[in-house]
Amino acid sequence: MHHFRGAKLEIELFQGFDASEEEFSNLLKQVMEKNADGLIFSAYPFDCYKFIHLMQKANYRPKAIAFAIAPALPDFYKHVGEFANGVFGPSQWEADKRILFPGTIEFIEDFIRISGKTPSYHAGGAYGSCQILEKAIIQTNSFEHKAISDAIHTFDTVTVTGRFKVDHTGKQIGHNPIIIQWQNAKKEIVYPARMQTSPALINFSKE
């Protein structure tokens, strides 16, 4: 919440919810009554799709809208159609050669060559995890779990998906997601600027 206040954004509604159809309908009514310029909806993809479909039925859309997880998935557009255009979301990684982490370009090219598909952020994360494990095994010269775990807790390194660093509990504190936006039925990276594939577009409302 302090991030919003620091950016001098006024929060009109901050509301939790369960996944029932009735509560989603009531939540949408509350959101529409506030008539805010932006909406951030944080939930797993299935619930995001349910809420989006309710928004479509109500012909409601604020000027800026973001969802967690779902927009980063390659089939987001298939689920929501034209509504996807303009939607923001965080992504842990995108298979774009402008993301110049060490080995990223080689990983993307090799993955496409072997599988015939563009790697998702899940694939990038899995490969990055193997890089971390490999580094820990080499550094400790051991397969012993505690030795490997202790080594990983000391790492501040970079994989194909970006910086890796965890705190004493194992919580990731080094990696920063990127921000994507769907534009013309395609995902574009809008932040950070050095990875940007397109500038952010605002005001996709139906006013």
Image (spheres, grey):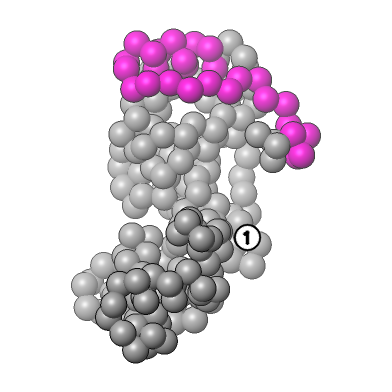
Residue pictured at 48% horizontal, 69% vertical: 153
Residue 6 can be seen, yes or no: yes
Q: Which residue is mark 1?
A: 192
Magenta residue check for 7: yes
Provide the secondary structure element on which disc 1 rests. Answer: loop
Q: Is residue 45 magenta?
A: no
Name which residue lies at 74% across and 34% down.
5
Q: Position of residue 65 (x, y in %)?
A: 55, 34
Kindly indicate the quadrant of the structure image that contains residue 123: bottom left
Residue situated furthest left in the rendering: 115
| Foreground of the two, 173 or 112 | 173
Give the magenta range. Answer: 5-31
**Residue situated in front as seen by the camera: 150 or 43:** 150
Q: Residues within 10 Å of mark 1 (few under 14, many from 20)?
A: few
Quadrant placement of the N terminus:
top right
Residue 77 in view (yes/no): no
Residue 95 vs 109, above or below: the answer is: above
Give coordinates of residue 36: x percent, y percent: 64, 22
Q: Tell me what residue is drawn at x 51 percent, y 74 percent.
A: 155
Q: Is 140 placed above or below 15 here? A: below
x then y, percent, for residue 196: 59, 62
Where is 83 relative to 108, above or below? Answer: above
Instruction: Residue type at mark 1: give it.
Output: Pro
Q: Is residue 146 left or right of residue 15?
A: left
- Quadrant for the C terminus, please: top right
Q: Position of residue 33 (x, y in %)?
A: 58, 10
Q: Residue at x 52, y 38 (%)?
A: 66
